[in-house]
Amino acid sequence: MSCEKYRDLFDSVFDGEIKESRKEKLFAHLDACPECNLQFKLYEKMISGVEELDELETPPDLTAGVMKEITAQPPPWKESGPLPGWFPGSWAWTMTFAVVLLVTLVTFVEWDNKPLVVAEPDQVNPKTWSPEEALILGRDPARDDLVAKVEPPTASNPVAELGILLVAHQGEVEVYDQGTSQWKPVQEQAYLSFGDRIHTGESGVASLEYQREKVSLRVKPGSFFQVLDRQTLRVYAGNAWVNVKRKGTIFRTETPNAIASVRGTKYSVEVTPMADVYRGVGLKSYAEFVNKTDTPVPTADLGLYSTRLGLNIMKAVSGFDVVDRLESEIKVFESAVQIIAKDSAGHERASLELEEGFGSKVLLATIEKPRALTENDFLAWSSVMPLDQDLLLRSRTKVDPLAGTAGSTPKIPAAATESSGPVSESDHPAPEFDDVRKR
Amino acid sequence: MDNDDYRVIKLCLKGKTEAFAELVEKYGRRVYNLAFRLTGNAEKSKDIAQEAFIKVYRSLDKYDPKYKFSSWLLKTVSNLCIDYHRTKPDSTASLEVILASKAESTILSDLAVRQQGMDGGLEAKLEAKELGKVIREGIDLLPIDYKAVMVMRHLQNFSYREISQVLSQPIGTIKARIHRARKLLKGYLESWLVEGR
């Protein structure tokens, strides 16, 4: 690995997101390379320097000043009588996502300044989540809301006939026995029933064959899944490679943030603490993501992310044929979706961030060599969702979820959504729409 | 969430305005310091802190106990700071401009290490008291978006998720911004280390 590559790892060290083996490699390199060693020290110093910046004492009359103001006149809400129900505002909507987010945060804010602790990789990106951990992370297997809708196996449709075969290849592979409420290791193979939960240990590898539907899955170590029905697998944690062999067969994977429905394609699904990551989902297949929240949402389709739309936008602006030439990676966060297109060498060529999916806005578009957009592009998109020209590539007008509450108008600064990511290191403000046409 | 905060808010909503003072006392320091790091101006920070509390108070009825009061409050603070920043004439050159005017500092420091060796004073310089001052200057020079993420992440110990909540931006964007901010700040330190500015 080159020095440059090693230096790229610094960020992940300080974010505690580096694998132990990589970290060891990095430190071995630092011992051998004085240049990189100095760079690392500089980085370390910089971060600890920021952490140690002095805090100022609160001005003594702050409280008095605030209290004087707020007692001077009655609050506006007193005049408007009792409150309307909680919900209509976009703040409510954003916070709906935040609920999911908060649930998954085991400990929230610790305000006291702490020394920099580089977390063990497992804390940050657990490769192996025990069922208990999955529970802590808010993925409650007991909340089988969907299982209830599935017809239970009957005499005429016994378990074995479901044709869902689990094969243990190596390591620990367990199935939860609903009768005894215990996890039981799978020796070689087992037919599964609806509602069965599967867990693979640290080195456990299993495959899952839907013999009738011709869907096969390779389940990687540290995964925690549940078979919901013939077409649906719930993924609480871990990683799987899914191959839907028959064209036209629809298969769904449900992850904490999304439900992906795919038709006849191969893809991988991975649940990470940050996002649910789907790879290889192209335009050929049908894939849509529904944001899942525990709170009922006012409009059902608000939570729908259309990847077709995202990829269409990307295709139109980039001029790349996303369908044939680029592999796409779709990351579903609690409140946003990011779509990244990569070429065959694995380089990112275009990326797009959508916020709140359907009917919402393009947050950020980083596209290499954008081509001019035509009226037809807009016609095509607006049939999928109402799209305002102004919204495209002008994510900066993003609505402030607090606008209606704290009385502030949208405040996301012009540069706020400007691309600053690893994809484009551009320091220039994101182009205005017209500029894109000219470029 | 924080039941205590909610208890206070309920009191306020029932007409016990004076209860709000508890929240100002509790979060005043954090609010003021965030404003100070974002604006670099102590006097203005006090105004902003005060304004943020008042704004939040005036829409207290919209508060939902399911969510953190502090996230809402800090969001209001950062919005006010960004507002202030917009109205301010752009007097200081940004860090990006400063760095662009210097030679590629990484190459410089690599070269310096090779010429002087690690014992050549570079390491000792890293330990110098002055470093803190240089970091402060660097932070002040960062564009406000970068400054906000750096301060929240490293000074106030927010997680990426929390920052993403407070700033209403996807985590991916926040991460990218922190990455960029660190890079800029490191560049600034390097140029100081090698050239002594």
Image (cartoon, rainbow, N blue to C red):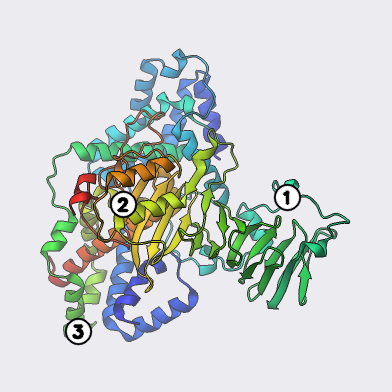
Chain bearing tag 3 is: B
Chain bearing tag 1 is: A
Which disc is residue A147 wearing? Answer: 1
- Amino acid type at circle 1 is Val
- Amino acid type at circle 2 is Asp
Q: Position of residue A315 (x, y in %)?
A: 35, 56
Camera-side residue: B189 or B93?
A: B93
- The residue singled out by tag 2 in the image is A54
Q: Position of residue B174 (x, y in %)?
A: 37, 53
Q: Position of residue A111 (x, y in %)?
A: 45, 49
Chain bearing tag 2 is: A
Q: Is residue B61 left or right of residue A416?
A: right
Let me know if marks 1 and 2 both belong to one chain: yes
Query: Viewer-nearest of labels 1 and 2?
Result: 1
- Gap in Å between the C-alphas at discs 2 and 3? 35 Å
Q: Dividing the picture into quarters, in which one does residue A351 lie?
A: bottom left
Residue B171 vertical position relative to residue B60 in the rendered view, above or below: below
Mark 2 and 3 residues: CB-CB less than 8 Å, in contact?
no
